[in-house]
Amino acid sequence: MGKTLAEKIISRKIQKECSAGDYVVTPVDLILAHEGTGPLAVDQFTALGKNEAATTGLFFSDHAAPAPRKELADVQRRLREFSRDTGTVFHRPGTGICHQLVAEEWAAPGQIVVGADSHTCSAGALGAFGTGMGSTDVGVALAFGETWLRVPETIQVLYTGSLPPGVFAKDLILETIGRLGADGAIYQALEFGGEVVSGLDMESRITLANMAVEAGAKAGLCAADSTTAAYLADQNREDAYLALAPDPDAVYSQTLKIDAGDLSPRVAVPHFVDNVHPVEEVERVSIDQVFLGTCTNGRLSDLRVAAKLLRGREIPGDMRLLIGPASQRVYQEAIKEGLIDIFLDAGGVILPPGCGPCVGVHQGVLADGERCLSTMNRNFQGRMGNPQGEIYLASPATAAATALTGKITDPREFLR
Amino acid sequence: MTAEIKNTCWVFGDGISTDHITPGRYYHLRGDIPALAEHALEDANSTFADQAKPGQIVVGGKNFGQGSSREHAALVLKERGIPAVIAESFARIFFRNMVNVGIIPITCCTAGFQTGDELVIDLEGGRVKNLTRDLSVSFAPLPSIMRDILASGGLVPYVTEHGGLT
Ligand code: SF4
């Protein structure tokens, strides 16, 4: 019987054939945690009496960076010191969002990546089985170099046709979550395929994989192909490449086919990610703040799309446009390409690379009754620091169009 | 593990996220679980945060615990003395986290349950009885590794006992 990507990756790692439903203990290639979840992982590692990491340990300072208050400065220092003492790696504030840095420096096809952050599934874009867990699971994985898992069933998501102008990977994944529902893939993996995925660049594939967890999935996987090889080669990591594809006779729990050609831009409406509507249905909802960034859509191609719309234009006086490059590398490239100037000329505010306002700690908390349209992955009540605020989710193009008009706007109006 | 849990319950709807349970605006309190626990579930029902008593049972709808992986969401419920959460379905990271910190997750139909109802959870028989509404629903047992982790009192004691996962 053929294997899905998830079954292939896990079988290869445990050096034994396994299939959906099996419980296995598997070696772990990378663990990751940040200032929100790292301290507890470190406590558990220490409680186990360990002082040396049994696998590659990556710590990040991105969720509240630079530190907005003393308690968070303290935990960032703690992670820095722990890394120094245990041979793990600490990424200092301002370097970027954990999932982006994992893609830029660490993830590779065939790996098992266990992160104390739910969007660890982002690494699936590179053909790594990335999955989010709690701090204790991650502390144990760091201590023993292994974790237990149930090999998941897989939902195959096939995107056919081609993306119309103004429609992007973000719209595809929002539509997918809208169709599957926020619990539609619990305990399962999503496997993205079809001609659209083959043609997508790595940055857009990360957008797809990143949001797999919003359908409840354990992982969101793309095959590793020539695009993956080129992405790794760009980072001087060509040796990390391994071609990976599902078997043609792999068994899926379900196949969801979406014709990309039929799609218009999509918007997820408060307070649930699966509350997805075509932009046409929510146009003219007034918006106070637009946030372009995060591990979902803070990459160079996202900034380029937004800059294309914003070039030579200005946002209204009562709009706030926040831009958070996903990493220092993205930020530097954006400066070189002149994108940052375009954003500043348009009236935008550039945030340091990191999560920014995504998790409601700082930098762009909403006032009571305010609405934000964001390129992030979650619109849960209170997510941006105020339960009286509302969050709409959309692509960078829709975000830029909305910033220009102050109302939810179809980006195709600016692309005509 | 005790074979039976009996107490009143607090009922929440579908899609309760870990942001509802431990809002991001209390990020700085993550190192102080008792302080964070004072805000448990505050964004879903602020009365719970003020009035929940140790031993009471939390009941949810679909996809309870969705979203962020923050284990603090399970830890604050543990800190408040919640022995078990019953829901129609759980988000998987939260499900694992509950087991890892020693809270029992029970997956079954919770239709008709209301806050204040008196429940009895029969762990061995796999049944939840709602005494107030005269309902009885069955639930499937947890996978054996999770039962073993719960029996040890959580993942850290489990791996300590076994010298690892294998
Ligand atoms: S950008 Fe947002 S979703 Fe991504 S890791 Fe940071 S807080 Fe989480």
Image (tube, grey):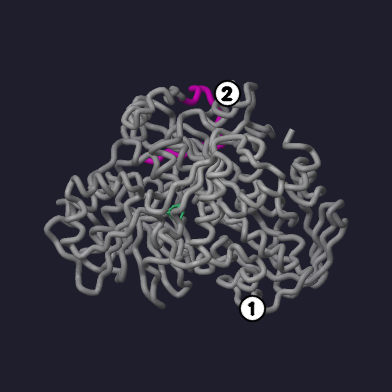
The image quadrant where one finds the C terminus of chain B is top right
Q: Is the C-beta of the residue carrying label 2 under 8 Å from the nearest atom of ligand 1?
A: no
Question: What residue sits right under mark 2 in the picture?
Answer: A12
Q: Considering depth in this image, is B90 or A349 the residue closer to the camera?
A: A349
Mark yes or no: residue A135 visible. yes
Residue type at mark 2?
A: Arg
Return the chain for callout 1. Answer: B
Looking at the image, which residue is at 81% across and 42% down?
B161
Q: Quarter for ligand 1?
A: bottom left
Mark 1, Cα crowd under 10 Å, few <14 / some 14-19 / many 20+, is few
Looking at the image, which residue is at 44% across and 42% down?
A209
Tag 1, which secondary structure? helix
- Mark number for residue A414? none
Residue A258: which quarter of the image?
top left
- Magenta span: A245-259
Residue B58: image location, x then y, percent = 70, 65
Residue A317: which quarter of the image?
bottom left
Residue A74: image location, x then y, percent = 53, 61
Residue A62: which quarter of the image?
bottom left
Residue B115: image location, x then y, percent = 70, 73
**Is A184 located above or below residue A358 in the figure?**
above
Return the chain for callout 2. Answer: A
**Is A347 located above or below residue A61 in the figure?**
below
Looking at the image, which residue is at 67% across and 48% down?
A46
Instruction: State yes or no: residue A278 in magenta.
Output: no
- Mark number for residue B47? 1
Mark 2, Cα crowd under 10 Å, few <14 / some 14-19 / many 20+, is some
